Image: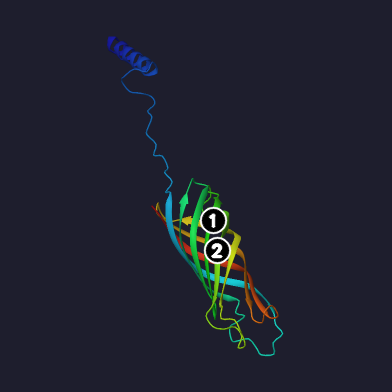
Amino acid sequence: MKRLLAINSMIVVYTSLAFAGGGIIPLEQDFPTKEHKVKQWFIYVAGGKSSLDISTKLTLPDPLNDGALDDSGTLLEVGGGYRFSDNIFTTLAYQHTALDIVTIHNLYVSINYQFSDVIFKPYVGILGGYSQLVWDERPHPVLPSEDLSSESAMYGIQAGMEYRLNDRWNLFAKYQYIVYDHTMDIKQGGDIIDHNSANNILIGVRYAF
């Protein structure tokens, strides 16, 4: 009987110490949590396809040279960026579009908002910059001008999605609509070829550091 009474007394003392915050065994323990750190800087490379809107005003009887009105080409883009938070990032990019006898160079910046709470992390953004179009060959046999290049401001919108492979590597895909004003004047305003805009689709990979 005395032994049973002693055991009960020990249980009462142990329980009292536990609820009073005694030092025998704590009821709750705070574990350190690992804080998520955004990888701020990143670089990327992407490739894809560009479809262009081309308009013409032609009165000359001679036909255009082959490839002068080519409106679809391969696209390569390299760039880097900075992530301000899980939702906001910016990029600086160079873009190279190769058509049959035309090459387009774009240099632009973008600002983007990303929805980071879903697995494929969609984002939308706006962009603006500088564009240069270069004719690798004359578009028309009677072209009097020796100036085979055009420069223009460019602007547009983009939308994309991103898939995280690990802490540093991400896959992404994006669509862009870009507006510029590249005009080839064949005959002093009488005959022209205008490259007005582009629809771009790109797939690429990013590395964060």
Secondary element under disc 2, as helix, strand or loop, is: strand
Residue for point 29% across, 11% down: 6
Specify the amino acid type for callout 1.
Ser
| Residue farthest bottom in this picture | 62
Residue for point 48% across, 56% down: 163
Residue for point 47% across, 63% down: 204
State if disc 1 and disc 2 touch (CB < 8 Å): no
The numbered dot on residue 110 is 1
Q: Tell me the crowding category of disc 1: few under 14, some 14 to 19, or many 20 or more residues within 10 angstroms, Cα based.
A: many
| Residue farthest top in this picture | 2
Q: Quadrant of residue 185?
A: bottom right
Q: How many marks?
A: 2
In the picture of the structure, the residue carrying the numbered disc 2 is 130
Q: Nearer the viewer, residue 149 or 125?
A: 149
First in sequence: mark 2 or mark 1? 1
Q: Quadrant of residue 36?
A: top left
In the displayed structure, 127 sits above or below 31; it is below
Q: Position of residue 53 (x, y in %)?
A: 64, 72
Specify the amino acid type for callout 2.
Tyr
Q: Position of 156 compared to 4: left or right? A: right
Secondary element under disc 1, as helix, strand or loop, is: strand
Q: Position of 199 compared to 91: left or right? A: right
Q: Nearer the viewer, residue 201 or 111?
A: 111
